[in-house]
Amino acid sequence: MHHVPIRPTSITELQPAERLLVWTFRAWLGDPALRQHIWREYRRHFDRPAALDAIDAFSGTIEALRRNARRPILYHQPCCPCLGADEVTLLIAAAALQAGNTDMAARVSLWLVRRPGVAPLLQSLGRYADGLATYDLLLPERVGPAVARPAGAMPELSLVH
């Protein structure tokens, strides 16, 4: 199996299904004019009913985030090669759901939404992840041991591009 880094920091480190999810997230939240490009991209991967279902599920995911976010959700522009913590968190939750690990997805989702928002987020994101799996677009599980930070180290700073 192809090795995937546990904590990706660049789009180039992602598998195709992950790139699709991140690009969709960025394009959806960015310029509304990009929605027509989202539709075209999904039609390249799915038949029409599956594309409609995937987009509907993703719309529900965004709505769950919008209604229940515990803080502003950060994301990069569609063309940016960097990955932010919120983007990676969404990937980890979707991969956990695709693998049937609902407990992990729920725990990770608390980084993004308040407790009452976990169920609506997981319902929509799970539908989306299942749709990807139907077309063999599999999300690798990126979980592993925590990386220890040296004593006295400065906290990481994140930039949004």
Image: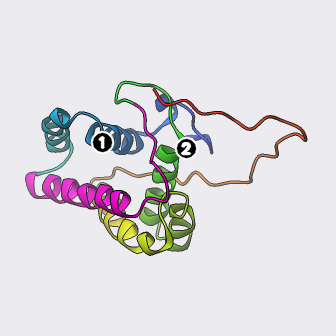
Q: Residue at x 31, y 65 (%)?
A: 124
Q: Amino acid at mark 1?
A: Leu
| Lower sequence index among marks 1 and 2 | 1
Q: Nearer the viewer, residue 85 or 140?
A: 85
Secondary structure mostly seen in magenta is helix
| The quadrant where residue 119 appears | bottom left
Return the mark for residue 85.
Answer: 2
Q: Give the structural element (helix, strand or loop) at label 1.
A: helix
Residue 70 percent location from the top left of the image = 49, 59
From the viewer's perspective, is residue 117 above or below residue 79?
Answer: below
Q: Mark 1 = which residue?
A: 29
Front in this rendered view, residue 18 or 1 = 18
Q: Which mark is residue 20?
A: none
29 and 2: which one is in front? 29
Q: State the CA–CA distance, disc 1 to disc 2.
A: 16 Å
Q: Residue 134, can we see it?
A: no
Query: Can you say which quadrant of the picture contains the N terminus?
Result: top right
Magenta region: 48-76
Disc 2 marks which amino acid?
Ala
> Mark 2 falls on what kind of element?
helix
Residue 44 falls left or right of residue 10: left
| Coloring applied to the structure | rainbow
Give the residue at x 34% y 62%: 67
Relative placement, left or right, of 67 versus 92 is: left
Coordinates of residue 109 in the picture (x, y in percent): 50, 62
Position in image of residue 46 (x %, y %): 18, 49
Residue 87 lies within the magenta run? no
